[in-house]
Image: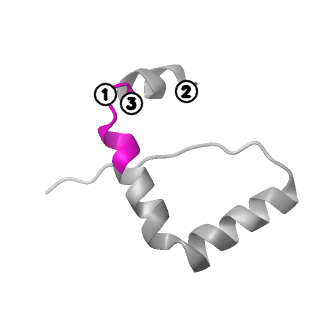
Amino acid sequence: MSQITIQCRLVASETTRQQLWQLMAEKNTPLINELLSQIGKHPEFETWRQKGKHP
């Protein structure tokens, strides 16, 4: 079994980052895990990864 690590860079204010972290870590962990899983399966994921951004 292999694992894939997805990294992203969030450019936002400290308040926004704190709110997002709280949602990710405390409230919506299953949602975030599902979103990360689905993003990795998207047909354009490799293009986004190579460009370092998505539309």
The span from disc 1 to disc 3 (Cα, nearest Å) is 6 Å
Residue neighbourhood size for the residue with mark 1, other residues' Cα within 10 Å, grouped as few (<14), some (14–19), many (≥20) = few
The residue located at (80%, 57%) in the rendering is: 16
Q: Nearer the viewer, residue 25 or 35?
A: 35
Check contact, mark 1 vs mark 3: CB within 8 A.
Answer: yes
User: Going from the N terminus, do you reach mark 2 or mark 1 first?
Assistant: 1
Q: Amino acid at mark 3?
A: Phe
User: Going from the N terminus, do you reach mark 2 or mark 3 first?
Assistant: 3
Q: Amino acid at mark 1?
A: Pro
The span from disc 2 to disc 1 (Cα, nearest Å) is 15 Å
Relative to residue 2, is residue 51 depicted above or below?
above
Left or right position of 51 against 44: right
Q: x, y percentage for residue 5?
A: 39, 50
Q: x, y percentage for residue 9?
A: 64, 43
Q: Amino acid at mark 2?
A: Gly
Residue tagged 3: 45
Judged from the image, the secondary structure of the residue bearing numbered disc 2 is loop
Residue tagged 2: 52
The span from disc 2 to disc 3 (Cα, nearest Å) is 10 Å
Q: x, y percentage for residue 26?
A: 60, 79
Q: Which residues are magenta?
A: 38-44
